[in-house]
Every structure is written in C-alpha cells, then in structure tokens.
Image (spheres, coloured by chain):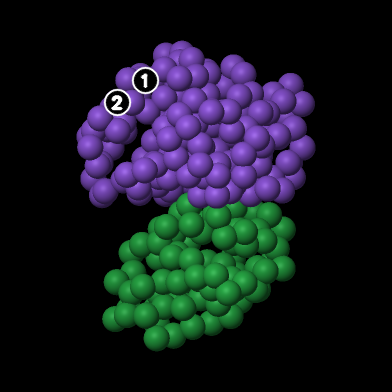
Amino acid sequence: MPNNRFAQFRSPIQGRLVQLEQVPDPVFAGKIMGEGFAIEPQTGDVTAPFNATVTSLMEDTRHAVGLTAEDGTEVLIHFGIDTVKLGGAGFVSLVAQGDEVKAGQLLLQIDLEQIRDKVPSLVSPVVFTNLPEGVGVTVEEGRTVKAGDVGFFSVK
Amino acid sequence: MVQQEITITNPTGFHARPAALLVARAGKSKSSVTIIHNDKKVNAKSMLNLLGAGIRQGSTINLVVEGEDEAETLSDLVRLIEQMPE
C-alpha cells in the first residue's frame, strides 16, 4: 500500500490521540482487528478520512463505520467502547452502507453528553483492518488533532 | 468442503468484538472461509465485509470452509460463535 495513502489520511474525529494499546478494551488494545490508533473525542462528529465506499454501517446501532478506499485500504472507525449496547441512542448516521463518500464528508453525529455516562469510555479506535503482516502504526500520544488534520501518524 | 449452519444468539449480533475474533481465526486458516447469510456470500477473512453483512441475533448463517485445514477451522469457528462475547 503506498505510504502516501496514509500521509493524506485525514483525522475523522477531533480530539486527543491515544495509542491503540492504551484503549480500554482487549480486542482493540490487543490489535486483534488490526493496527491503528485511537482518539479521545472532543466533539461528536465523524468525518471520512479519504474518498471511500461505506462497506459497513449497522443501521440500528450506527456506532461504527467501515470504509474501503479506492485502493482497497480498509478502515474501521469505532466510536466509543461498548457503544453497540446503546442500540443507536445518541447516534445519527448521515450516510448508509453502500454510499460513496468524499474525504471530509460528515458520516456520523454523536451526542457526546447523552452517551458519556452510559459507556465505559468514549475513546474511539481507528483501525486499519487489512494492513499486511508486520506493518505497525505509531501516533504521537497526547497530541490533539482537528478533524481533517493529516500527517499525525506513521505506518511502517 | 465442510459446512455448518448456526444461529446467532448473541443479543448484540455480529458486532466488532466477536467479528474480530472470528476474522482473526479465519485468517489463520489455510482454507477459504465463507459465510452465507440471506443468500449473500461473505468472505470471513474480511472484517468490513463481515460487519457489513448485517448478521444479527436470530440470524442463521452457513459457515463454509474449504481447504487443507477445513475440519479444524470449522470446529474452531463454530466454537467461537457459540461462545461469542457480548
């Protein structure tokens, strides 16, 4: 996968960067889904990191969106931990599975204050689900990114 | 080729956490792993395809494994599904 794909990857969420290993959930922290990073959100907007097709968006829970880029790169953006249990309450989706979206396009809107006390964590993993074996992702822990920022992580 | 039909009982269905465990196990298999749901075929080695298949509590799926380690792959996957975490 060309590295410039990741150089142009725009942050989907505004917030503080967290290493994936620090996410309070063993499946994400253990990188079972793949490598990536996480963001502690400051706002409830999720925007597309690149031009893509929405390959997965469960319409009844709307808590996670999977996107496939034109070159086949897959990313899963999972808003919060255990948010599937909210059954969609507090989550609005502006797109549907199968839609083509453009980088920067608003995908989900979440009411942070409504869900904050109902889930163990708002930390949102952003996972690349089809990176080749041996490829790792590093991010500057603690740095704050705005939606649309690029160049804040590296893929090796 | 081996296959088994299985009904999903997990109340939150096939969301990210159980899907991750399934995809990880399927990925280790030397065989092809396909899930058939509502006549749609999904490659079980692809996380996003699996999440996009809309498999919920009550869904019945057909797990189809074909290849040199098909028997143990199928039984491992069936066990993972039966013990799916919420």
Q: How many dots with numbers?
A: 2
Q: Is residue A28 left or right of residue A90?
A: left
- The residue furthest bottom is B1
**Residue at x 48%, y 66% (from the top left corner):** B42
Residue at 51% over, 59% down? B50
Q: Which residue is mark 2?
A: A7
Task: Say whether disc 2 or disc 1 marks the residue closer to the N-terminus.
Answer: 2
Q: Which chain did the renderer colour green?
A: B
Query: Is residue B23 at least partly visible in the picture?
Result: yes
Work out whether A55 lies above or below B76: above
Q: Residues within 10 Å of mark 1 (few under 14, many from 20)?
A: some
- Checking the image for residue A57, the label placed there is none
Q: Which residue is mark 1?
A: A150
Q: Residue at x 68, y 54 (%)?
A: B12
Residue B65 falls in which quadrant of the image?
bottom left
Give the amino acid type for the residue marked by disc 2 in the picture.
Ala
On-image quarter of the N terminus of chain B: bottom left
Quarter assignment of residue B44: bottom left
Query: Mark 1 belongs to which amino acid?
Result: Val
In the picture, which chain is purple? A
Tell me if residue B11 comes above or below residue A9 in the rendering: below
Residues at marks 2 and 1 touching, judged by CB atoms closer than 8 Å: yes
Location of residue A104 in the rendering, given as x and y in whole percent from the top left corner = 49, 25
Residue A142 visible within the image:
no
